[in-house]
Amino acid sequence: MLRALETLQQTLRAGGAGQPALRFNALLQQACEHFPGADTLRLIQPLSPDMSVAVIEVRLAMMKRTLEREMTGAASPRPAGVERRPSERRRWQRRPVTWTAWLVLGQGDALAATAMDASRHGLRLVLDGGRKPIGFAHGQKCGVEIHLAGNGARFFRDAEVCNVDERGIGLTIAEPLPAVLVPSTEAPGSAPPARRPWSLLSKLFALPLLLWRW
């Protein structure tokens, strides 16, 4: 199944693949039948025939990563004590940033945004175009893709909404952000942040560049 996913990815990048949405839907159905307990697969919805290639690539990468984790046992339940309440988690030093971002929702939709500050395990996003963060709920699963203007690098993290207010959308991420971009230790003597500290919840997804805008 992974080989079939990779073949479709390569075909899309080469500009080929007739009816790619239908091929994707067939692969998704097979994956759900083989791994009925995979939560992430349930978030991936079947595609309409006219869906753009960019969206199909995002869904393919998400499904591929999920299958890899299922096959290696990485999606097994966490040991007791690993999941701690946010108040028990370490506060990581934040720094102001200005990163182009895509907030990817469970249905595969994406919102253009800007990351305004970041820590090793958290981000604060402001939606582009003055959009208000309406309709987001605490604990909502999502993903975020960051694009760095300087060197063209990008990375993706699976995330969870931990705070929504007039300042933007706070996200918690389990897999730390690259150490070269954010501090890896807590700042000596720094005061605790006023809002809820970001937690460590989620997994790493490696998604391709998302080229379409909301």
Image (tube, rainbow, N blue to C red):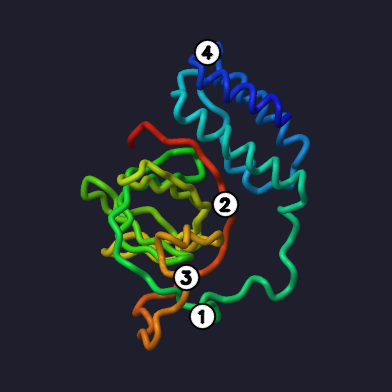
Residue visible at 74% across and 61% down in the picture: 77
Q: Which residue is mark 4?
A: 16
Q: Quadrant of the C terminus?
A: top left
Could you tell me the amino acid type at mark 3? Ser
3 or 4: tag closer to the N-terminus: 4
Q: What whole-number distance in Å separates the C-alpha atoms at marks 3 and 4?
A: 43 Å
- Give the percent coordinates (x, y) of residue 4: 69, 24
Q: In the image, 132: left or right of 200?
A: left
Q: What whole-number distance in Å separates the C-alpha atoms at marks 2 and 1?
A: 23 Å
- Helix, strand or loop at disc 1? helix
Nearest the viewer among 164 and 120 is: 120
2 or 1: tag closer to the N-terminus: 1
Q: Nearer the viewer, mark 1 or mark 3?
A: 3
Could you tell me the amino acid type at mark 2? Leu
- Give the percent coordinates (x, y) of residue 110: 40, 41
Q: In the image, 11: left or right of 15?
A: right
Residue visible at 48% across and 36% down in the picture: 208
Q: Which residue is mark 1?
A: 87
4 or 2: tag closer to the N-terminus: 4
Q: Nearer the viewer, mark 2 or mark 1?
A: 2
Residue at the bottom extreme? 189
Q: Which residue is mark 2?
A: 204
Badge count: 4
2 or 3: tag closer to the N-terminus: 3
Q: Which residue is mark 3?
A: 184
